[in-house]
């Protein structure tokens, strides 16, 4: 039937058309009722609920989750064991965002620097047994490049792991009582403390039980893997070797409270938040003290606030610092107290006894322990890298002359503890046989370098190689008699914390040829001397960096107030322009 305009239609045609339209409308309604609704976001449940709810609030507020947040939402990284095994069986690396999720198991595909995995461990307090170090040597030799690197979180990394051996490495770690779970990606990283905890004559509190308790608390509470970004926590028990707790998201610092204060006398921990020196911030004291037995619960509450309020739309603004910038330290603390169900004790820092000064040389050489007749020995590890043979040798040394304990430090070296005074010379000789030493120059003792572009895709320079070149040049040129820290970092992530070094170098491509080089910063510090180093020279070619550093140290020795003035104090008495002239004006041919 042909239909014209409504005016031209007969009554019968009009009724037909009305029925047709009504039928189509009814069909659309029926189809809409029968059609499944658009897939809803996964319903939060169980220990994963906290992170899911935070993501949901972000979306409900009009935000767009980052690709990483969407990947975490789609596939929980802790449930990937079958995929890890399948990839290993087939010799395949993960692709796309799966590469990020693999980091939850400590596995980093570091291509193009190396077409291999790096595996980062978790070593709470940086302390491991001799048999564990020997086991790492065995797995490094069997499944990797035959060496391990000490990190700036008192941890170990094993490199050049082929994909078919990734699961072998994870199982070998488990067999010796170690793990890499949560060692990378958006997780709470290795818990650190003073490497001399329990043996240091000046410490206020042995933080080893706290670090170990928090380590296991994290491993066994799945909701603490729902962070929007990585997170660092450290304990300082008052020991002579720094834990750098003020560079962490949460820093616990032991203090002694005398009689007559607003809280009971004894040892408490002061709480500081927001340290991230790569973004030029130290952790800020909150005016709060925490009893030792409450530290784990307080840490958990603070992390939960971060999970709820961290930015999930911009990874460049997702660290805890930016939550603090947005809502303030007081509000953050109030929210944490809400999780705890009580308020924390307030006490001004002036009401606490001053902390004993740290010894910037105590991580190297022999030093007396609190245990009568015992020493710890700080061992210099060139470029923070130990071969499998050296690891086995150190393990045997620790068993023969000590208590079988190895203590890693944030200065990328290690300590062997509980050595009898009578065995000092024997230990020194055994170290020499391993190509190691407890007696090195101040420049080597204070040298810190990240992995660099030899093993990291983000780095712009070969930091480890250049650090050794700097040390060798300075030893030939400068009679340095005071501890000086030189930090080399390969990129803006600042894994080597260049901003807190006496001299800090951050890698850059320089010149028309875009060769490896550095921007040079001077005058950083930590603890009671905390400061962010100031940039003084840009675009220094890597080959010129040793001379620039040597010139600065020459200037320090010539112009310091007295032989005991530390480098950072000297640097802060000079303007960046003066330091730049010092660095550049004396560059020798």
Image (tube, grey):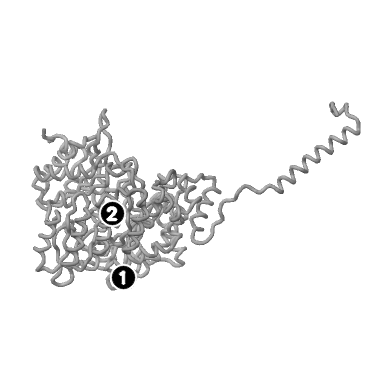
Question: At which x and y percent is residue 523?
Answer: 21, 46
Q: Quadrant of residue 3?
A: top right
Quarter placement of the N terminus: top right
Question: Does 333 sit left or right of 112 as displayed?
Answer: right
Quarter placement of the C terminus: top left
Question: At which x and y percent is residue 544?
Answer: 17, 36
Question: At which x and y percent is residue 17?
Answer: 84, 34
- Residue marked by disc 1: 261
Instruction: Please give the name of the residue rendered at 91% of the width and 30% of the height, measured from the top-left corner.
Output: 10
Mark 1 vs 2, N-terminal side: 2
Q: Which mark is residue 546?
A: none
Q: Residue furthest right?
A: 11
Q: CA distance from mark 1 to mark 2?
A: 57 Å
Instruction: Please give the name of the residue rendered at 71% of the width and 45% of the height, measured from the top-left corner.
Output: 32
Q: Which one is nearer the viewer's eye here, 415 or 94? A: 94
Secondary structure at numbered mark 2? helix
Q: Which one is nearer the viewer's eye here, 65 or 377? A: 377
Question: At which x and y percent is residue 297?
Answer: 40, 66
Closest to the camera, between mark 1 and mark 2, is 2
Secondary structure at numbered mark 1? loop
Q: Is residue 459 visible?
A: yes
Are there few (<14), some (14-19), or many (20+) residues within 10 Å of tag 2?
some
Q: Which one is nearer the viewer's eye here, 176 or 205? A: 176
Instruction: Please give the name of the residue rendered at 29% of the width and 39% of the height, measured from the top-left corner.
Output: 460
Q: How many marks?
A: 2
Question: Does 326 sit left or right of 562 as displayed?
Answer: right
- Residue marked by disc 2: 142
Q: Residue furthest front?
A: 89
Are there few (<14), some (14-19), or many (20+) residues within 10 Å of tag 1?
few
């Amino acid at each position: 039937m042909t239909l014209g305009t409504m005016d031209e239609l007969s009554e019968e045609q009009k009724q037909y058309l009305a029925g047709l339209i009504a039928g189509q409308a009814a069909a659309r309604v029926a189809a809409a009722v029968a059609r499944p609704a658009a897939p809803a976001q996964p319903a939060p449940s169980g220990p994963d609920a906290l992170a899911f709810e935070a993501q949901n609030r972000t979306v409900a507020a009009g935000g767009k989750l980052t690709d990483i947040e969407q990947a975490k939402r789609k596939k929980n990284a802790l449930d990937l064991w079958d995929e890890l095994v399948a990839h290993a069986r087939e010799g395949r690396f993960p692709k796309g965002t799966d590469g990020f999720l693999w980091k939850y198991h400590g596995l980093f595909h570091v291509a193009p620097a190396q077409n291999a995995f790096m595996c980062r461990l978790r070593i709470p307090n940086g302390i491991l047994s001799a048999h564990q170090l020997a086991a790492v040597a065995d797995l490094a030799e069997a499944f990797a490049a035959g060496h391990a690197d000490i990190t700036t979180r008192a941890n170990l990394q094993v490199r050049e792991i082929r994909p078919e051996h990734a699961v072998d490495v994870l199982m070998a770690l488990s067999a010796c009582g170690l793990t890499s779970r949560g060692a990378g990606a958006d997780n709470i990283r290795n818990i650190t403390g003073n490497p001399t905890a329990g043996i240091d004559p000046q410490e206020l509190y042995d933080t080893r039980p706290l670090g170990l308790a928090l380590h296991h608390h994290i491993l066994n509470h799945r909701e603490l893997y729902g962070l929007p970004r990585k997170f660092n926590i450290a304990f300082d028990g008052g020991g002579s070797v720094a834990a750098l707790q003020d560079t962490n998201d949460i820093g616990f610092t032991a203090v002694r409270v005398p009689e007559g204060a607003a809280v009971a006398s004894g040892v408490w921990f002061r709480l500081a938040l927001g340290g991230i020196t790569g973004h030029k911030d130290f952790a800020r004291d909150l005016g709060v003290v925490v009893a030792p037995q409450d530290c784990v619960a307080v840490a958990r509450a603070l992390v939960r606030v971060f999970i709820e309020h961290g930015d999930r739309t911009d990874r460049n603004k997702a660290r805890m610092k930016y939550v603090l910038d947005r809502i303030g330290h007081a509000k953050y603390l109030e929210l944490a107290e809400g999780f705890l169900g009580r308020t924390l004790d307030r006490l001004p820092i002036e009401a606490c006894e001053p902390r004993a000064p740290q010894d910037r040389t105590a991580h190297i050489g022999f030093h007396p322990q609190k245990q009568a007749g015992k020493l710890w020995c700080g061992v210099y590890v060139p470029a923070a890298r130990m071969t499998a043979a050296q690891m086995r040798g150190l393990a045997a040394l620790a068993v023969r002359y000590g208590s079988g304990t190895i203590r890693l430090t944030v200065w990328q070296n290690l300590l062997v503890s509980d050595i009898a005074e009578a065995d000092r010379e024997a230990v020194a000789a055994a170290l020499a046989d391993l190509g190691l030493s407890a007696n090195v120059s101040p420049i080597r003792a204070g040298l810190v370098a990240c992995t660099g572009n030899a093993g990291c895709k983000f780095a712009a320079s070969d930091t480890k190689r250049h650090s050794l070149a700097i040390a060798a040049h300075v030893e030939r040129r400068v009679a340095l008699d005071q501890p000086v820290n030189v930090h080399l970092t390969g990129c803006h992530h600042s894994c080597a914390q260049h901003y807190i070094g006496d001299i800090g170098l951050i890698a850059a491509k320089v010149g028309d040829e875009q060769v490896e080089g550095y921007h040079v910063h001077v005058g950083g510090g930590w603890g009671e001397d905390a400061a962010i180093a100031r940039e003084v020279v840009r675009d220094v070619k890597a080959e010129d960096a040793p001379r620039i550093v040597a010139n600065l140290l020459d200037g320090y020795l010539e112009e310091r107030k007295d032989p005991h003035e530390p480098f950072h104090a000297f640097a802060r008495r000079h303007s960046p322009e003066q330091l730049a002239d010092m660095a550049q004006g004396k560059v020798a041919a």
